[in-house]
Amino acid sequence: MSRTAKSQWDFGELFPVEQIRRVLSVSELTASVRRLLEKEVGDVWVTGEVTNLRAQASGHVYFTLKDATAQLSCVLFRGEAAADREFLQDGQKLLLNGSLTVYEPRGQYQLIVSAIEPQGLGALQLAFEKLKRKLQAEGLFAQERKRPLPRYAQRLGIVTSPTGAAIRDVLHVIERRQPGLEIVLAPCRVQGEGAAAEIAEGVRLLNSWSAAQAVGDGLDLILVTRGGGSLEDLWAFNEEVVARAIFESLLPVVSAVGHEIDFTISDFVADARAATPSAAAEIITEGAFASRQFVSDAARRIGQVIRSRLELDREDLDALARRLGRLHPRRWVQERMQYLDDLRVSLARALRAGARLGQTTLAGLRGRLRRAHLVAAFEQRRQIVREWHRRLGERARGWIKENRAALEAMEARLKLLSPENVLARGYSITTDAASSRVLRSATETIPGQKLKTKLMSGEVRSVVEGGTQGPVL
């Protein structure tokens, strides 16, 4: 480039030397960009939505992190000890840590991921699902380990906030349905940092207190509860420490957290789950409440039982009186006399039936004798018919044989006289081609007449030229 003029008389270099250019190869340029990115940007945290997730057979995972206006290629290598790999799902919003570099073969910048964290409400849900799968695999949710609730609970331990709406709802239901139920409260926070540890400690404290009481004076079960709220508000009941405490409890545990649509880890681990705190109180007091109704109906039911018993005893007494009447000696003699009359009637009926049977048998024997004579006569006639049938058959076969021989002789004579047989000996038959009339003499022809001569094989067509001794072909 020419030198810049410093005055009106300095025009600079009229003929500048040729500018020296530095030419880079693609590899050199890409390497320079890579070094610049790794030096200036290096390790970064970046947030976005996962898309185009591809897990290769090698164990490496490739995906794209995007937001509303841009996207970034990412790779998580198999040997990278990044936790929470299960959060890598299409559509999941994540917070990633890694080093920014350039993949030189494609000239594409990418993020080599070293850490993964879920972000927002989706992070809590994913953490919930992860802990749920872990505890389920360990058997904390198994149905066979869940214990039945006592039907008539006398002492109830409650783990909840002493100022929350849940304790008020529970106490209201218990006062209405089972006022005599004793309550031992383990107060704790039900949301915020440290709430999970307090809930777990409350469950352990109630177990310890119950074990220290005399036999029959301990708790019957524990209720872990709080009112409704958002997922973040209920999160303390999704902590592993709470799940472990409920699982290790020696007393049956009822979990009633939030509303009907809310499910927490404590619900799955507990021996019973209630949709709301009020519903939990109704479940716990169901036995006593149902028994109270039973007791109130006891007097009426006892009266019914007594009346039913008296009615049955009266029927038994009537039956005994009737039985005594049947066992009186006069009654016995009367029954035997009646039985003797029945035997007489039966004997007379049997004699008449025997006589009728003898007559019927005699008539049958006579009929059989007559039929026997008829059968003998019929068999004799059958033999005669069979003999005539045999003779007719022999005559018919002889007649057929004689007629077949005569027919064969006539067939042989007919073959000898057949025109075809005559043609086979070298003769021919000549006919008029127009009328097919057989010609027997040359005088029957005229010159120019068309003839047709049939031979043994095929026929010959000819025209008469003249003469009376025979046609010249």
Image (spheres, rainbow, N blue to C red):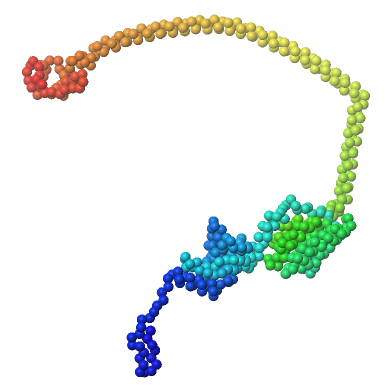
> Residue sitting at 37 percent across and 8 percent down?
401
The answer to whether residue 253 is above or below residue 316 is below
Q: Is residue 112 left or right of residue 211?
A: left
32 horizontally vs 123: left or right: left
Q: Residue at x 51, y 72 (%)?
A: 35
Residue 102 place in picture, x, y as percent = 50, 69
Residue in the picture at 41% in, 74% down: 23
Please identify the quadrant where the N terminus is shown: bottom left
**Count of number-bearing discs:** 0
Q: Is residue 395 visible in the rendered structure shown here? A: yes
Residue closest to the eye, 401 or 300? 401
Extreme-bottom residue of the structure: 8
For residue 285, say whether it is visible. Answer: no
Q: Along the line of sight, which residue is nearer the eye, 156 or 17?
A: 17
Residue lying farthest right? 329
Q: Which of 254 and 198 lies nearest the eye of the viewer?
A: 198
Placement of 164 over or under 139, stated as above or below: below
Left or right: 352 as drawn, with respect to 64: right
Could you tell me residue 293's position as x and y percent? 83, 54
| Image spot of residue 141 (x, y percent) | 71, 55
Q: Which quadrant: the C terminus?
A: top left
Q: Residue at x 69, y 12 (%)?
A: 360
